[in-house]
Amino acid sequence: MTSHLNARQTLRRKLRQARRSLTAQQQENAAHALLIDLPQRLVALSKTSNTSIQSVRKVALYLSNDGEISPHLLCEYFWQQDIQTYLPVINDKQLTFALYSKDTLWQENKFGINEPLTNDTISGHELDMVFLPLVGFDQQGGRLGMGGGFYDRTFANKKANTPPLLIGLAHECQEVKRLPIEGWDVPLQAILTPKHIIFP
Ligand SMILES: Nc1nc2c(c(=O)[nH]1)N(C=O)[C@@H](CNc1ccc(C(=O)N[C@@H](CCC(=O)O)C(=O)O)cc1)CN2
Ligand SMILES: Nc1ncnc2c1ncn2[C@@H]1O[C@H](COP(=O)(O)OP(=O)(O)OP(=O)(O)O)[C@@H](O)[C@H]1O
């Protein structure tokens, strides 16, 4: 158990270092590449997950931090499609989600990441699709996060075939062969990288 946790910490340090080492140009290219063939990739996603992409109304993204791949162009794409976008708001040990629009006002959370300044939030289970930030992933749908357990707690009771769809967003350099997984880890239903869409 302890060695498992140590392995996670060691991996976290290594993978965070790797994503932070990407240059501004590499980050920009990666964010753009997420849009390549996006409609086709979303169709593949709807087939594997048995959910209709046409019925997606509410999508959660995040504001990139610590070298994470930036979803800001995905966000623009959803706005063009009139799909509402949400951002995570830390609420004790869990996340709620606040609408993100051009008019959003901001406040920093305890980690220095901006959150919408509002009391009007929804529960994670009201979303259709969630793009999760991650530190590491594997082909089996394993996700290693920053270590707060926020996404795991928020979606702990989610059944595999009920919304929202949980999709990890990652740079290629965040893939590992097999993550040391814990009982509380909530599996990803897809992982989107600049070059691939992975269906575990
Ligand atoms: N962009 C983004 N937003 C997110 C997450 C995330 O992983 N990425 N989260 C996913 O859950 C939640 C925040 N979780 C986080 C957990 C730790 C740190 C962090 O930087 N930890 C520092 C120590 C900071 C401190 O204690 O002051 C570190 O480990 O270096 C950041 C975010 C909600 N919002
Ligand atoms: N469903 C849960 N109920 C209670 N505690 C939980 C739950 N999920 C995770 N935790 C606790 O949260 C802590 C951090 O978990 P973990 O290392 O998996 O976070 P993470 O997935 O890396 O973080 P994040 O989701 O915030 O990016 C663990 O110590 C674990 O005990």
Image (cartoon, rainbow, N blue to C red):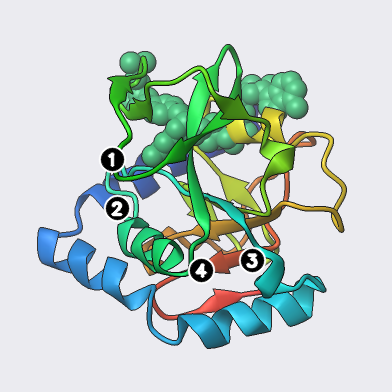
For the point 46% across and 44% down, which residue is it? 11
Q: Is residue 6 left or right of residue 165?
A: left
Q: Amino acid at mark 2?
A: Arg
Task: Mark 2 vs mark 1: give the one in front.
Answer: 1
Question: CA separation, marks 3 and 4?
Answer: 7 Å
Q: Which mark is residue 192?
A: 4
Q: Amino acid at mark 3?
A: Ala
For residue 68, above or below residue 49: above
Question: CA separation, marks 4 and 1?
Answer: 18 Å
Residue that label 3 marks: 190
Q: Which mark is residue 66?
A: 1
**Who comes first in sequence, dot 4 or dot 2?**
2
Image position, residue 157 (x, y; %): 84, 35
Depth check: give the residue in front, 196 or 17. 196
**Who comes first in sequence, dot 3 or dot 2?**
2
Answer yes or no: do the residues labelled 4 and 1 have beta carbons within 8 Å?
no
Answer yes or no: do the residues labelled 3 and 2 have beta carbons within 8 Å?
no
Image position, residue 82 (x, y; %): 49, 63
Can residue 167 be seen from the camera position used here? Answer: yes
Task: Mark 3 vs mark 2: give the one in front.
Answer: 3
Instruction: Give the secondary structure at mark 4.
Output: strand
**Who comes first in sequence, dot 2 or dot 1?**
2
Residue that label 2 marks: 19
Question: CA separation, marks 3 and 2?
Answer: 20 Å
The response on whether ligand 1 sits within 8 Å of label 1 is yes
For the point 61% across and 35% down, which residue is it? 151
Answer yes or no: do the residues labelled 3 and 4 have beta carbons within 8 Å?
yes
For residue 79, above or below residue 127: below
**Who comes first in sequence, dot 4 or dot 1?**
1
Task: Mark 4 vs mark 2: give the one in front.
Answer: 4
